[in-house]
């Protein structure tokens, strides 16, 4: 769980948390929830789901870094939080977004997971690399 700015600017404060992360049959599913803490008008949170076919991910690309948003959180989080990232060798990652009741799905080649700090990210990186290698 981490506290971030959402809206790409100072639109609102939010807590981001992973609701569920599951690896099943070489498919990683990560459900995240961005809960707004302060806004000028009452609105709901943002739900995001990333579905990663691990057998198509590049194990050399898995990293933890501090950089601007990519993937499913693009435009929802401002600043430079710590993120775990990976790219696909082929195929794509499905991102399902529910923003204020409006749902959409997009495909991308980038996995992007916000983490609280570098150490937490390094732990996730180790597990992701192991999962990718086991699925190849």
Image (cartoon, rainbow, N blue to C red):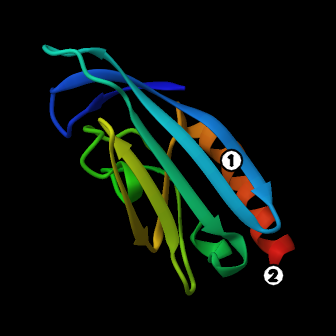
| Mark identifier at residue 136 | 2
Residue placed at 54% from the left, 26% from the top?
Answer: 1
Count numbered badges in the picture.
2
Whether 36 is drawn above or below 51: the answer is: above
Left or right: 83, with 13 as reference point: right
The image position of residue 50, as x and y in percent, is: 54, 56
Residue placed at 72% from the left, 65% from the top?
Answer: 27
Residue placed at 60% from the left, 43% from the top?
Answer: 121
Nearer to me, 112 or 62: 112
Left or right: 2, with 125 as reference point: left
The image position of residue 115, as x and y in percent, is: 53, 37
The image position of residue 23, as x and y in percent, is: 77, 56
Residue 44 sits in quarter: top left
Residue carrying label 1: 124
Residue 41 sits in quarter: top left
Helix or strand or loop: what does disc 1 sit on? Answer: helix
Left or right: 71, with 59 as reference point: left
Helix or strand or loop: what does disc 2 sit on? Answer: loop
Left or right: 91, with 122 as reference point: left
Q: Mark 2 or 1 closer to N-term?
A: 1
Residue contact at pointers 2 and 1, CB within 8 angstroms: no
Quadrant location of the C terminus in the rendered image: bottom right
């Amino acid at each position: 769980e981490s506290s971030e700015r959402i809206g790409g600017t100072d639109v609102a404060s939010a807590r981001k948390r992973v609701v569920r992360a599951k690896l099943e049959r070489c498919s990683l599913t990560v459900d995240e929830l961005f809960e707004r803490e302060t806004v000028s008008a009452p609105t709901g949170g943002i739900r995001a789901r990333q579905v990663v076919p691990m057998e198509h991910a590049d194990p050399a690309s898995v990293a933890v870094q501090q950089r601007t948003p990519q993937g499913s959180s693009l435009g929802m989080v401002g600043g430079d939080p710590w993120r775990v990232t990976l790219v696909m060798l082929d195929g794509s990652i499905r991102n399902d977004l529910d923003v204020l009741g409006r749902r959409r799905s997009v495909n991308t080649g980038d996995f992007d997971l916000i983490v609280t700090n570098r150490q937490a990210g390094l732990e996730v990186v180790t597990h992701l690399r192991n999962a990718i290698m086991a699925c190849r």
